[in-house]
Amino acid sequence: MSTTAQLVQGHHDPTLQHHFHTKEQQFETSKLGMWLFLATEILLFGGLFVGFALMQQKYPQAFLLAHHHLDRSLGALNTVVLLLSSFTMVMAVWAAQTSRKKLLVWLLLATMACAFIFLGVKYFEYSHKFHEGLLPGKFYSHKGDTVPNQFVFFSFYFMMTGLHGIHILGGIGAIGWLVIRALKGDFDANYYTPVDLIGLYWHLVDLIWIYLFPLLYLIQ
């Protein structure tokens, strides 16, 4: 098909933006943009990982003792939940690519359900920390510490898990938008770019937790 013919066809296709010649060009450009965005997210969390490592070297004993206040079983549960959500998201992209519209909706809803479960578990974890006074910075009020500076660990704990939680909420909103559009029948083998791009975002959110879990919960 000639470029002219593609342009003419594009004018009748609401899924092809006017500034792109073909759907292939639109898809590749959109995917490149998402990868660039994800790179900035990695830099954002990377700074926190570096800061955590530096402070852990400065206060090794405080970090070691502080992490015992975290519940490994809840952290492991959330890891399994996010891995499951990553699988359902992969299958949702496949369902969109193969025009399985009803299956797409159910898989997106399953991914959202996993996200809500993750946040529910985090709520119980946070509630325990607030009750025990295991809070960041000047708000730290836990009694009976034998080693000082454990508040530094919890400062990073809340910064990193809190920022990750915000990304989970953003993912829930984005996936909810996909559900609404999927119910309208907007995605099929001819057009599934938003599902693919939000899937990439969700995989990064899962991957970040895979690093956070051993870093925070499995310190030795």
Image (spheres, grey):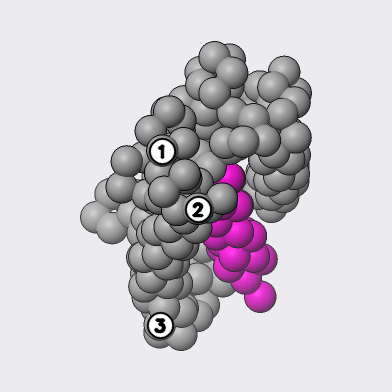
Residue 198 horizontal side relative to residue 97, left or right: left
Query: Rounded to the nearest whole Å, what is the CA distance between mark 2 and mark 3?
Result: 57 Å
> Where residue 119 sits: x, y (%)?
54, 34
Q: Nearer the viewer, mark 3 or mark 1?
A: 1
Residue 90 horizontal side relative to residue 219, left or right: right
Task: Establish if 176 lies above or below 65.
Answer: above
Q: What's the residue at 64%, 30% (across, down)?
A: 188
Q: Which residues are magenta?
A: 196-220
Comparing 190 with 178, the one in front is 190
Magenta region includes residue 65: no
User: Which residue type carries mark 2?
Assistant: Ser
Q: Main secondary structure of the magenta part?
A: helix
User: Which residue type carries mark 1?
Assistant: Val
Magenta region includes residue 200: yes
Q: Is residue 112 at least partly visible in the picture?
A: no
The C terminus: image quadrant: bottom right
Q: Quadrant of residue 138?
A: bottom left
Q: Which residue is mark 3?
A: 54
Mark number, residue 8: 1
